[in-house]
Image (tube, rainbow, N blue to C red):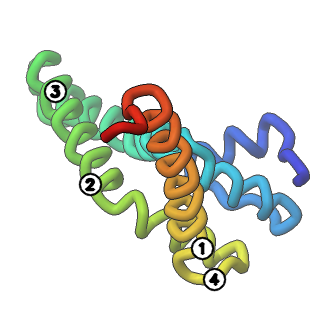
């Protein structure tokens, strides 16, 4: 797996597309246990500039008070990130198809990996809390 340089990782975080030689790294990012955290960070970084522009336009263009502009910008930020997270699975799977993976590959990989860890967690629970006479 080829890891992109720092500036390309930053570009990816703000919504940019990486060259195909980094497709394994992108798949790894979309399937690791913290994928949803990184998805939220990515969504936040994509929505934040627009909300700042809207808040500044309200203050400078319409003469709104700062607290109102910040409240409107914050609400836009919350709604934007909420909408993005609502479709996180679908969005991530669609992004993977752009890198040549079959539709649903990231979801299937995460589901399979979660099943293995769930079975392991259940086995450890039974060993710790269940006795053989039950």
64 left or right of 36?
left
Front in this rendered view, residue 62 or 75: 75
Label 3 sits on residue: 69
The residue depicted at 28 percent of the width and 48 percent of the height is 80
Measure how far apart labels 3 and 4 are at the Cα level.
43 Å
Q: Secondary structure at mark 1?
A: helix
Q: Nearer the viewer, mark 2 or mark 4?
A: 4
Pointers 2 and 4 in contact (C-beta within 8 Å): no
In three-dimensional space, the C-alpha distance between marks 3 and 2, rounded to whole angstroms, equals 21 Å
Q: Is residue 24 left or right of residue 85?
A: right
Q: Earlier in the sequence, mark 3 or mark 4?
A: 3
For the N terminus, give its image quadrant. bottom right
Instruction: List the residue tagged with mark 1.
Output: 105
44 vs 115, nearest the viewer: 115
Question: Which label's residue is closer to the chain start, 1 or 2?
Answer: 2
Question: Dot 4, how many residues are within 10 Å of its Cα: few (below 14), some (14-19), or many (20+)?
Answer: few
1 and 4 marks in contact (CB < 8 Å): yes
Residue beneath disc 2: 83
Label whose residue precedes the other's in the sequence (2 or 4): 2
**Place of residue 129 in the rendered image (x, y in percent of width and height, measured from the top left):** 38, 28
Residue at position x 88%, y 64% from top?
21
Tag nearer the camera, 1 or 3: 1
Q: Nearer the viewer, residue 69 or 61?
A: 69
Q: Distance of mark 1 from mark 4, alpha carbons?
A: 6 Å
Instruction: Give the quadrant of residue 44.
Output: top left
Q: In the image, which is nearer the foreground, mark 3 or mark 4?
A: 4
Of the two numbered discs 3 and 2 on the same chain, state the one appearing first in sequence: 3
Left of 47 or right of it: where is 2? Answer: right
Query: Circle 4 sits in a helix, a strand or a loop, which is it?
Result: loop
Q: Quadrant location of residue 16?
A: bottom right
Q: Which residue is mark 4?
A: 102
| Mark 2 → mark 4, Cα distance in angstroms | 24 Å
């Amino acid at each position: 797996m080829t890891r992109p340089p720092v500036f390309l990782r930053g570009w990816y975080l703000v919504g940019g597309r990486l060259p195909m030689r980094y497709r394994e790294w992108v798949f790894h990012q979309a399937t690791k246990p913290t994928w949803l955290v990184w998805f939220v960070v990515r969504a936040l970084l994509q929505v934040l500039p627009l909300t700042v522009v809207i808040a500044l336009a309200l203050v400078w263009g319409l003469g709104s008070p700062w607290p109102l502009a910040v409240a409107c910008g914050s609400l836009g930020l919350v709604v934007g990130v909420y909408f993005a997270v609502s479709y996180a699975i679908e969005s991530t799977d669609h992004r993977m198809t752009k890198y040549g993976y079959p539709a649903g590959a990231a979801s299937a990989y995460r589901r399979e990996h979660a099943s293995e860890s769930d079975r392991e967690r259940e086995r450890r629970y039974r060993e710790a809390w269940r006795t053989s006479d039950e």
